[in-house]
Image (tube, coloured by chain):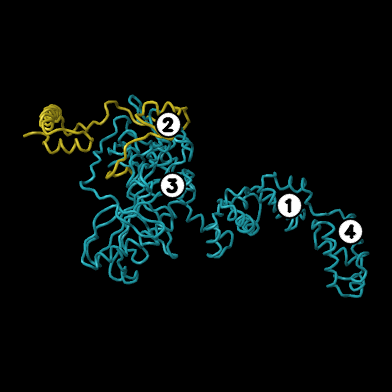
Amino acid sequence: MTTTLPAYDEVVARYEPVIGLETHVELGTNTKMWCGCPTDFGGEPNTRVCPVCLGLPGSLPVANKAAIEATIRIGLALNCSIAEWCRFARKNYFYPDMPKNFQISQYDEPLCFDGYLDVEVNGELVRIGIERVHLEEDTGKTLHVGGATGRIHGATESLVDYNRAGIPLVEIVTKPIPGTGALAPEVARAYVTELRDVIRSLGVSDVRMEEGSLRCDVNTSLNKPGEEWGTRTETKNVNSLRSVERAVRSEMLRQASVLDAGGKITQETRHFHEDTGDTTPGRSKETATDYRYFPEPDLVPLAPDTAWVAELKAALPELPRLRRKRIQQEWGLSDLDMQSVVNAGAVELIEATVAAGTTPAAARKWWLGELSRRANETGVELADVGATPAQVAELQGLVDAGKLNDKLARAVLEGVVAGEGSPTEIMTNRGLEVVSDTGALTAAVDDAIAANPDVADKVRSGKIAAAGALVGAVMKTTRGQADAKTVRELILERLGAQG
Amino acid sequence: MAAISREEVAHLARLSRLAVTEEELDTFAGQLDVILQSVAQVGEVTAADIPPTSHSVPLTNVLREDVVVPGLTPQEALSGAPDAEEQRFRVPRILDEDVAS
């Protein structure tokens, strides 16, 4: 089944895309949405379950205050109105990923609604309308067995782990986004990126797409200029920022080829494939989905106190986009340099290091240099590399005080990452401090002069450059722990030459 | 006029995964109709100044603190399951159904 897809340029010349995004964010609360079971990622199957999240008869859910608060904060950060009164709703469906046979969600009364998020695309601001932000619960994980492929098709049984069932899940839905033209894929990516950064800045989720704590569905439709919006498809299984961009683009190309051939777009769920970048149709629905939503009888309505909401609003952190602008200015970075800081995930780390008393340039040097390299090598996030901003600031303080030179500082940093202690402790324990004892240094200089009489004579006769060999010899005997500049001055002084 | 049609009962039965025979459809449609007609009488006394009630207790904001409470062991959790494997609930495969969220 090979169809030749039209060129992207031609597609956007003939059609206008309308996109929309539904994003699910797992909150980083200690406990689940309706019960006190822990939410840690991973863990042995069915070790974080109780009668409530297993839907056992007689159990009653009680809403997690921290999850409600986190959702309101997300809504406020996205410029939403907060409902004065709203209810949870039962979404009924028959699938074993929820043991209750329904999911507690919100229907026509979302907790937050009607907001926006400004995102930057190619230096231009694009305002993305936010339709709603609501709270629901995550599902369990099913493992399909009995078939050859492990996928649902061909499987004969499913094994279910309910550790994830009931973890608070926030759904953020955009309004339809028309008018982005050829930039639609980039706008989609920029939105999810910015949304991720906003949520991360609120500290309410670790928003890791690879671990599934941020998940994205992408709606795409095409219409001819001046005509009504086309039929949209919903692409699921989009698990990275890059995939968000690719999914929109590939769906635009596919829909254009169908429309070009006089065909019609079917409203359906499609699945994105990371390996090929294509989408394929999901299970077709013979009948319209009927979730029979009704107000959740086991949970009383929510009526967030106005004063509480105002308090949460006042305590919102500076938004990432504005913060980046301010920091870039303060640090005097070019757009490109700032981008590399952002891409390395180093903004907060550098900021904290600067706050601990280091110059932006020095802080940036350590985080983007030695530590980024280390993080890349070991495949961890920069924040998890093993060094804290306070330790980096302490290290730089030792350099500034002349106790460490660059080479020694790197050795100390290695010790920090290896968990050997604070920079000062490591310097002392490993004996890495710059030799500042002039007596010991003079002795080393005298030894070097005595061992290299020819070189010493050259320096005495005015060939200052020859002193380098003597500096090298001293550095060798002090195992690199001398300050090269001081050594050089001492040598010249002993040989009666001028530097 | 009946408050619920035979087709609607069949639809609900399908959604609920209940195997209902043709005769049962007639029986249930009749019974459900009586129930719905009875409940509909409530609508006759409601007025514009009475808001729809979804909860019988006049409470809002019943919340709990975000504190871990011990739950069940996997053995306890699986003790009532018809079948289990690899410490997981074992169920027949389900196809052609939409997954939540």
Front label number (1 vs 3)? 3
Q: CA distance from mark 4 to mark 2?
A: 68 Å
Is residue A233 toward the left or the right of residue B78 in the image? left
**Mark 1 touches mark 4? (CB < 8 Å):** no
Side of B11 where A419 appears, left or right? right
Task: Please give the letter of the chain rendered in cyan.
Answer: A
Judging by the rendered image, the residue that carries numbered circle 3 is A212
Residue lying farthest left?
A: B1
Looking at the rendered structure, the kind of residue marked 1 is Leu
Residue density around tag 1, few if under 14, some if 14–19, many if 20 or more, within 10 Å: some
Front: mark 1 or 4: 4
Q: Secondary structure at mark 1?
A: helix
Residue topped by disc 4? A444
Residue A347 locus on image (x, y percent): 55, 54
Near mark 2 (Cα within 10 A), the count class, few <14, some 14-19 or many ≥20, is many
Counting from the top left corner in percent of width and height, residue B83 is at 36, 31
- The first of marks 4 and 2 along the sequence is 2
The hue used for chain B is yellow
Answer few, some or many: residues within 10 Å of disc 3's Cα (few below 14, many 20 plus, some between 14 and 19). Answer: some
Query: Mark 3 vs mark 2: which is more N-terminal?
Result: 2
Q: Which one is in front, A156 or A251?
A: A156
Q: Chain of mark 3?
A: A
| Residues marked 1 and 3 touching at CB (< 8 Å) | no
Which amino acid, by three-letter code, is at mark 4? Ala
Amino acid under label 3? Gly
Which chain's residue wears label 1? A
Query: Same chain for the residues at labels 3 and 2, yes or no?
Result: yes
Mark 1–mark 3 distance (CA, rounded to whole Å): 41 Å
